[in-house]
Image (tube, rainbow, N blue to C red):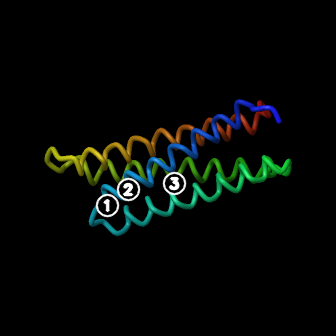
Amino acid sequence: MAISRLSIIKFLELAIAVACIGLHYKSRANDFNADTLSATAFGGYVIILIGGFAGYLMSTPINRRIDIFFSLVGCAIFIASGALNIQIYQDYGKSEWRDYGLSKASLAIINGALFLLDSLLTWRGDF
């Protein structure tokens, strides 16, 4: 089973989503909406990406249209989560909690960009 560029990108998405879960645990805010969106995005996409890897290992990958849909929704939800977290944590004084929050937000936005790249490569058929 050959390793493709797309599977490397998906592994990076998974690794960043897991890192975001860890940072979210260290930096929960008192904003219900941002916390819920962040936990849902990070946890939900860890499950989706692990399911995609399981399908890839069993030689039954996800349909391209569904993969593009998941990638575009992932792009939107991770960028929204990152933007909300930046808005929350930018006004706090210098602290480790703030640094964790801003790191989580930055990684979420980077992961959103990776999801966009993933959807474009899947759409073009470059695997």
- Estimate the x, y position of residue 104 in percent, counting from the top left: 38, 47
Disc ID at residue 62: none
Residue occupying the point 22% across, 47% down = 96
Check whether the beta carbons of the residues at disc 3 and disc 2 lie within 8 A of each other.
no
Q: Secondary structure at mark 1?
A: loop
Question: Circle 1 is placed at which residue position?
Answer: 28
- Disc 2 residue type? His
Percent of width and height locating residue 111: 51, 42
Q: Which residue carries the number 3 mark?
A: 77
State the image quarter where residue 2 is shown. Answer: top right
Name the element at disc 3.
helix
In this picture, residue 98 sits left or right of residue 71: left
- Can you give x and y, in whole percent of width and height, for residue 46 in the image? 58, 55
Question: For the N terminus, which image quadrant?
Answer: top right
Q: Are marks 1 and 2 in contact (CB under 8 Å)?
A: yes
Which residue sits furthest left?
Answer: 93
